[in-house]
Image: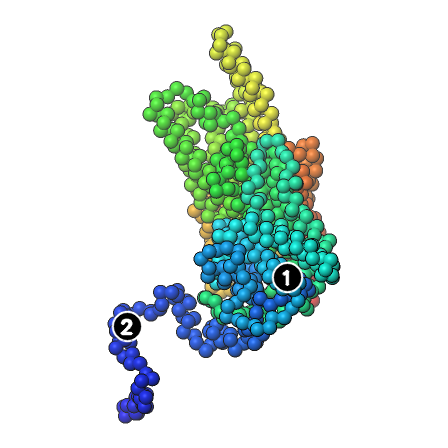
């Protein structure tokens, strides 16, 4: 106790000069009175994590104030207003282009673009000003005063006019990207929008920024004769031109395309994108040639020390200059290609396939994140218009057109005027329910379309959420269609069995099955499954693909054929029964219109469903069924055990793993989830009857299935390549769907080779079929496959 008292006595201040001290005792105790028990004390200006970091003083990793000891004198006292040479300016521009692409490569502004003192200074001056004009966007930092700035008149001109124009253009573009990011992209997952509380020229008119860039280009050209060094000046102009074109990209959101209307060329409108690619590839060529001329101190961690930094100190991030250059080229080329293809879409088959194969399936790491976000804003506008349509093409009309593309064309349930005569309250009640159903379909269509530009991982997550909506919709649509059919005979009848057609429910069920299959497949693409789970997943996909195939070739085909039968024969019978007069003539005219316009469309739908969709799902069924059988063969050579859990696991079973993996599908009403016993029965493994003859039968069946799948994909390719047959459904010049099928065909060929290798192993090692072998003789190797849904699963003999 005495030691404690002595220690407290040592803490007493010896106030030799009391005037130099302030007594804060009363203030301190008054402030702590407001503290509640068991509550964390933090400033209202910080969230909890930031408050925790704030107390980490003198920690070199967490205390950003420690940066002052890390930065050099050049970095601390760098004066952005100093005159600059042509080569140094080009070097700064190239560095900033590199950092821009680095930021778009999932980095943050403080460690990329804001690490440039030129950028920081202009933004600080703009943010602090009330007037928000170009005039206050100065490169002068009032805290830094350099008495002798040096430099000649031309270098001063470059600094005051050209460099300022470039920084303004870059910041305006970054501000636009930030707007796209906060509207569409996912924070940190796609784009990090942390801006150190700086305003990226949000209130500055873009026209005035573009005028600054054009003025700088004009003045450089005007001074060429006196300045000399024409090559460097030309290179300077090229970089300014690229920046000017980058700021023109925003105009894309004003473009308007009409599906099912006469197409027109938009090449002149978006020529600046193609011109940018040309300048980059033929004139600029590289972002590294002037690297050695970067002014010392112009890029550093200074911004992390100087501004409101809510994050820990982070090293600067910069992509390789070659990768950055390629990414910059790709940004323009990908946007140009997407827009050109969009403008050529002439029907909703092409629209659906374009979105699926050219957009959704391409949203991988090589696709520019800014282009992803921008295309989403272009595709669906704020008023839900599709591609800026001014003729009423919106999410609802797209939904109805996509339904017609599958099976609902000319369905009576959509023809309200053709409904039987009903009392107004009853009719209004039916209309309200129908409108609600259509609104729900519109919502899930919006969900699907808006998901198309997300990264592949996020796509799968949102697809899983949407699956429950589709399942709920199926129940609602079946109840509605059955109710109006049974009570009021609203709807179509299937030819030959007097049953309701249920076209809306069939459309929903088809989409639900397609979605389930895609979600399961994407697990392979995203490497979510362990090798011992692969047989279960492929088996379940084969089961769902078979259901989708049966739906297409069964009920949906019957719906379409019944409609054709009714329009050609059924209407004729009705007309014959009518007495001569206006009603009969109107019916004849109606039939003629249907035969001229509707029946050809139905025949196109039947052809598409039969030659493409049915073939695709049949191919999925065959290839996944073949892989399931392939795993059975692997079981017989003891490469994998399909009846036990993961290797070296004592705490779980394969059945538990199956139930856990399939849990997202357990809540789906139709189709119900097969049990683990169903899976065991389907994989055809009978340990009591493992004979060479039985295994040979399985081996032959496996080869047959892979060959059948290969032939199906071959037929699909022939259909796609035959433009007379497929030209109506697929956009000319788009190869996404063709590459998709080619990859599936290559996968079949790969597995045919592997199965034949396995056959030789079985012939050479009969003992493996009948004797226990604790020491595995073979291993499985997984490699990237020809198709994203099918990794290469290869058997290797242990050395």
The spot of residue 679 in percent (x, y) is 52, 49
Mark 1 packing: few (<14 Cα in 10 Å), some, or many (20+)? Answer: many
Q: Is residue 428 left or right of residue 29?
A: right
**Residue at figure coordinates x 28%, y 92% from the top left:** 2
The spot of residue 74 in percent (x, y) is 58, 74
Judge whether 775 appears above or below 379 on screen. below
Mark 2 packing: few (<14 Cα in 10 Å), some, or many (20+)? Answer: few
Q: How many marks?
A: 2
**Residue at figure coordinates x 50%, y 63% from the top left:** 124
**Residue at figure coordinates x 27%, y 75% from the top left:** 27
Location of the C terminus (image quadrant): bottom right
Residue 489: quadrant of the picture: top left
Q: Which residue is mark 2?
A: 31
Residue occupying the far top of the picture: 580
Whether residue 630 is visible, yes or no, is: no
Earlier in the chain: of badge 1 and badge 2, it is 2
Q: Which residue is mark 1?
A: 158
Which of the two residues, 592 or 71, is positioned nearer the viewer here?
Answer: 71
The spot of residue 768 in percent (x, y) is 65, 59
Indicate the secondary structure of the residue bearing disc 2.
Answer: helix
């Amino acid at each position: 106790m005495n030691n404690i008292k002595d220690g407290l006595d040592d803490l007493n201040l010896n106030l030799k000069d009391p005037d130099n001290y302030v007594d804060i005792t009363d203030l301190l105790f008054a402030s702590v009175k407001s503290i509640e028990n068991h509550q964390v004390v933090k400033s209202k200006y910080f969230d909890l994590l930031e408050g925790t970091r704030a107390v980490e003083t003198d920690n070199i990793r967490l205390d950003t104030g420690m940066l002052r000891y890390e930065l050099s004198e050049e970095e601390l006292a760098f004066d952005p207003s100093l005159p600059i040479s042509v080569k140094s300016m080009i070097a700064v521009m190239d560095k900033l282009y590199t950092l821009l692409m680095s930021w778009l490569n999932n980095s943050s502004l403080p460690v990329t673009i804001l690490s440039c003192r030129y950028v920081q200074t202009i933004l600080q001056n703009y943010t602090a000003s009330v007037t928000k004009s170009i005039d206050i966007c100065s490169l002068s930092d009032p805290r830094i005063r350099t008495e002798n700035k040096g430099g000649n008149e031309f270098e001063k001109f470059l600094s005051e006019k050209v460099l300022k124009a470039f920084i303004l253009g870059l910041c305006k573009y970054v501000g636009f990207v930030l707007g796209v990011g906060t509207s569409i992209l996912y924070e940190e997952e796609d784009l990090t929008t942390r801006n150190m509380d700086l305003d990226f020229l949000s209130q500055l008119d873009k026209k005035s920024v573009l005028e600054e860039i054009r003025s700088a280009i004009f003045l450089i050209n005007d001074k060429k004769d006196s300045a000399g060094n024409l090559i460097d000046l030309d290179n300077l102009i090229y970089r300014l031109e690229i920046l000017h074109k980058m700021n023109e990209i925003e105009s894309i959101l004003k473009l308007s395309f009409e599906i099912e209307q006469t197409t027109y060329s938009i090449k002149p409108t978006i020529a600046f994108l193609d011109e940018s690619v040309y300048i980059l590839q033929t004139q600029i060529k590289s972002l590294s040639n002037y690297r050695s001329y970067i002014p010392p101190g112009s890029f550093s961690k200074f911004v992390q020390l100087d501004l409101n930094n809510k994050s820990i100190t982070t090293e600067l991030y910069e992509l390789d200059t070659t990768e950055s250059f390629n990414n910059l080229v790709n940004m323009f080329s990908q946007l140009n290609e997407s827009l050109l293809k969009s403008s050529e879409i002439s029907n909703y088959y092409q629209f659906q396939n374009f979105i699926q194969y050219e957009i959704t399936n391409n949203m991988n790491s090589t696709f520019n994140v800014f282009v992803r976000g921008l295309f989403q804003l272009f595709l669906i506008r704020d008023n839900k218009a599709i591609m800026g349509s001014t003729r009423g093409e919106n999410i609802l009309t797209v939904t109805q057109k996509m339904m017609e593309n599958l099976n609902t064309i000319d369905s009576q349930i959509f023809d309200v005027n053709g409904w039987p005569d009903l009392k107004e309250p009853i009719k209004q009640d039916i209309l309200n329910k129908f409108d609600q159903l259509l609104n729900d379909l519109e919502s899930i269509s919006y969900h699907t379309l808006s998901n198309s530009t997300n990264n592949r991982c996020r796509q799968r997550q949102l697809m899983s959420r949407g699956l429950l909506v589709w399942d709920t919709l199926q129940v609602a649509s079946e109840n509605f269609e059955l109710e109006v059919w049974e009570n009021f005979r609203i709807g179509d009848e299937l030819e030959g069995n007097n049953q309701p057609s249920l076209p809306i429910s069939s459309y929903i069920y088809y989409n639900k099955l397609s979605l389930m299959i895609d979600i399961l497949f994407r697990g392979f693409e995203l490497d979510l499954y362990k090798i011992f789970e692969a047989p279960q997943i492929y088996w379940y996909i084969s089961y769902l693909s078979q259901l989708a195939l049966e739906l297409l070739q069964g009920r949906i085909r019957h719906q379409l054929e019944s409609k054709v039968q009714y329009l050609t024969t059924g209407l004729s019978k009705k007309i014959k029964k009518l007495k001569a007069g206006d009603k009969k003539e109107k019916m004849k005219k109606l039939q003629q219109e249907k035969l001229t316009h509707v029946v050809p469309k139905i025949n196109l739908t039947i052809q598409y469903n039969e030659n493409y969709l049915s073939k695709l799902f049949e191919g999925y069924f065959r290839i996944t069924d073949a892989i399931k059988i392939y795993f059975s063969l692997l079981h017989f050579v003891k490469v994998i055990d399909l009846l036990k859990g993961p290797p070296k696991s004592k705490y779980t079973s394969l059945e538990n793993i199956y139930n856990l993996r399939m849990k997202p599908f357990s809540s789906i009403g139709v189709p119900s989830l097969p049990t683990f016993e169903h899976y065991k029965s389907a994989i055809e493994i009978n340990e009591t009857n493992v004979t060479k003859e039985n295994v040979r039968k399985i081996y032959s069946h496996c080869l047959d299935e892979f060959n059948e799948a290969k032939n199906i994909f071959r037929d699909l390719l022939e259909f796609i390549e035959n433009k007379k047959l497929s030209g109506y459904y697929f956009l000319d010049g788009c190869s996404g769907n063709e590459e998709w099928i080619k990859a599936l065909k290559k996968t079949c060929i790969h597995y045919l080779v592997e199965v034949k290798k396995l056959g030789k192993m079985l012939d050479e090692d009969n003992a493996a079929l009948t004797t226990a072998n604790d020491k595995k003789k073979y291993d499985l190797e997984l490699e990237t496959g020809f198709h994203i849904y099918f990794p290469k699963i290869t058997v290797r003999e242990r050395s």
